[in-house]
Image (cartoon, helix red, strand yellow):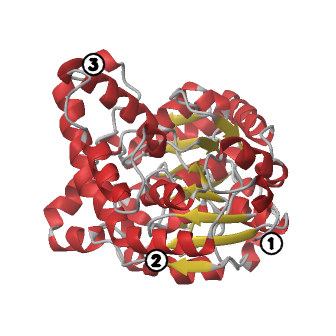
Amino acid sequence: MRILFATYSEKTHFFSMVPLAWALRTAGHEVRVASQPEIVDTITSTGLTAVSVGQDHSVNRILEAFPRLQERVADGQLDPFIRADEPEEDLSWEYVRDNYDSVVLSWFRLMNNPMLDDLVSFCRSWRPDLVIWEPGTFAAPIAAKACGAAHARLMWCVDFYGRMREMYVRRRRVEQGPDGPPDSLARWMDHSARRYGVRFDEEMTRGQFTIDQLPPSMHMDTGVDRYPVRYTAYNGRSVIPEWLRAPAGDRPRVCLTLGVTATERLSGYSVSVPEILDSLSGMDAEIIATVAEKEQRRLGPLPDNVRVERFVPLQALLPTCDAVIHHGGFGTTFTTLVSGVPQVSIPQQLDTPFTARRIAARGASIHLDKREATGERVRASVERVLTDPSYARNSRLLRDEILAQPSPNEFAEGVEELVRRYRTSPGRRTADLSGRP
């Protein structure tokens, strides 16, 4: 088969696709990855074949031009899905409507419009059998429908997209009636789809099926056809440093990592790294902190028990650790989980707060609001997860739940049957799955 992965230009979202893309490639399928020019080099660095489509989106330029807006994004104030796991009765219709309509305009359209025409053109010429897309790349299901391919979302997060979409559509129907005007996402997607001779349907907002990397206990019920695949860590090009090849010492090892988005996309970390490192200096523990180069100059003198590195591959570092302090990003969170290590999470935006709440509810972590993550509170939380054996025990239980999911290679074995099941194009034969006309 021909399988196309599609994502707007967000490196961390693409990284969540790499293990499955390679599993499908080594299973004998033709695999391409379509994205905007900004991350083409990142795609090719994985050994996968890139397709550059359209132009880069303008979100980064907008954030750079308006520092106050960047501060609000970093502070989570513009996240329309931040309350996706709250009881629906706690959210007014006006809140749901205004925030959802805002994100369609300020996020979905801005990210997708620059790549849409080129993506449809490529799909019509290459004719993929399956398009796998990250859940904010709505250009992909439009392109899939325009060329007759099956399409599926690959989740890198709790399904807050599906949860808020369900809530928005249901509440809108109650408030405005079934004959009301099209909603913001449906209107934009239908207008875009009609340019290519197809029409919008609700399936295009959630995929014909969903490939989910989260364990069942962390699912948010959104009524989709869900197929599990085991989370597999991918950190990009990596080199194991010499010090990490040596056995860990007798002291507990604690990792502090706050991801790359804060420094690559935003104005910096949302918590004080110097304050946290200073608070950890008195612990009888080895502290490994991954800090961006431009942030390292702000650290000042380092405590004797602290090692600062620009980058260390987390899939190699975290299994050697006894606790991890992090920002709640998907890759970091789940690499920590598959390592079976307790965590102290300081989530920042989007899905990260309710992902952190779910893990804390399972007894595998402590969740700190970033506004309250003082050095003193971080240290107290680290000491608690190190000394209370229930955190390590519950972390291993979550690890075992993740490892029980089908591997990417096992998922690849059944992908042709899934495509046969969901493909609905009237002009294509099942035989196309194994050969080109």
Disc 1 vs disc 3: Cβ atoms closer than 8 Å?
A: no
Please say if the residues under marks 3 and 2 sit with CB atoms less than 8 Å apart.
no
> Marks 2/1: CA distance?
41 Å
Indicate the quadrant where residue 255 lies.
bottom right
Quarter the N terminus occupies: bottom right
Q: Classify mark 3: residues with Cα within 10 Å, few (<14), some (14-19) or many (20+).
A: few
Q: Quadrant of residue 331?
A: bottom right
Name the N-terminal-most of marks 3 and 2.
2
Between tags 2 and 1, which lies in front?
2
Residue under pointer 2: 53
Front label number (3 vs 2): 2
Horizontal and vertical percent position of residue 374: 35, 46
Residue with the mark numbered 3: 90
Q: Is residue 432 above or below residue 173?
A: below
What residue is rendered at 53% in x and 74% in y? 122
Counting residues from the N terminus, which is met first, the one under dot 1 or under dot 3? 3
Q: Which mark is residue 245?
A: 1
Query: Which mark sits nearer the N-terminus, 2 or 1?
Result: 2
Q: Nearer the viewer, residue 31 or 434?
A: 434
Is residue 249 depicted above or below 207 in this figure? Answer: below
Q: Position of residue 94 (x, y in %)?
A: 16, 29
Q: What's the residue type where badge 3 is placed?
A: Asp
Circle 1 — which element? Answer: helix
Measuring from the top left, give residue 401's x and y in whole percent: 75, 34
Q: Under tag 3, what secondary structure? A: helix
**Extreme-top residue of the structure:** 89
